[in-house]
Image: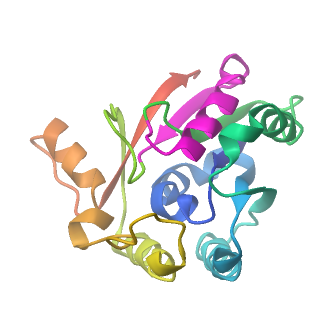
Amino acid sequence: MKDLYFFVAHLDDFEISCLGYLFKNIEKYRKINIIVASTWPPKIKIWDQNLKKISSFFSRDLTYINLEYPQRTLMSYLDDLKDDFYKQIDFSTPFDIVTHDNEDCHTDHLACSLVAGGLFKYTNRYTTIYSPSSKNFKANYWTGLDRNIYELKKECIDQYNIDNEQSYTKLGYYMQNEEHYNIGKAYYLENFVRNDLEYCEAYRVLKDLV
């Protein structure tokens, strides 16, 4: 079996963008690693609680590692971040990576994309995630969510508060309405006219060795 590495920039990125992938693919993996590049004090306790909920929901141990860089600084530490991330990889076991897309507008997300891209040729599957700061996201992989996983996702995200963020404007919320939580469905409906899923997440698979 393979290992799986989720490599995301922030505490909260996993809940927002990755639960559908885990939901659909969890049985394929020997070990599941969640590697978060940065930390931010107001999020730490929330993430710890969310991780326990997610592990309990799936009845699986999830390995969590935080690389401890400050939020919004990852582009300034690109070489160090690359070194720290690569040290987490077990190259003796085939592995897949799920990370940020190279069209993402958030510089921390882009830094993770640049770092993870260096491992592209070593992966069996390389997948990028949709995030609220994505642009020109070219989805080609969709995961349907049942009501229980959707409610878990919403419950986890709702614990965070935009007022505790480093947002310059403090405008908006983590998710503004029901459609924003379920934005992957818009991508799905555009591409599967004869099918319908109540809840959906969108991804981009750049490489898939089967």
In the rendered image, which quarter is residue 136 located in?
top left
In the rendered image, which quarter is residue 65 located in?
bottom right
Residue at 80%, 31% (x, y): give it: 79
Q: Can residue 199 be seen in this view?
A: yes
127 inside magenta stretch:
yes
Q: In this view, does 152 lie above or below 74?
A: below
Q: Is residue 201 left or right of residue 95?
A: left
Residue at 57%, 23% (x, y): give it: 210
In the rendered image, which quarter is residue 85 located in?
top right
Q: Is residue 2 visible?
A: no
Colour convention: rainbow
Residue in the foreground of this view, choosing between 167 and 181: 167
Q: Is residue 199 left or right of residue 11?
A: left
Residue at 51%, 78% (x, y): give it: 160
Give coordinates of residue 135: x percent, y percent.
Answer: 34, 38
Give coordinates of residue 39: x percent, y percent.
Answer: 72, 64
Q: In this view, does 111 lie to the left or right of 197?
A: right
Tag count? 0
Residue lying furthest top in this view?
121
Segment colored magenta: 104-130
Residue in the foreground of this view, choosing between 54 and 34: 34
Give coordinates of residue 200: x percent, y percent.
Answer: 31, 56
1 inside magenta stretch:
no
Q: In this view, does 22 lie above or below 103?
A: below
Residue in the foreground of this view, choosing between 10 and 189: 10
Quarter that holds the N terminus? top right
Give coordinates of residue 78: x percent, y percent.
Answer: 74, 34
Residue in the foreground of this view, choosing between 188 and 75: 75
Q: In this view, does 8 lie to the left or right of 194?
A: right
Residue lying furthest left in this view?
194
Residue at 47%, 62% (x, y): give it: 16
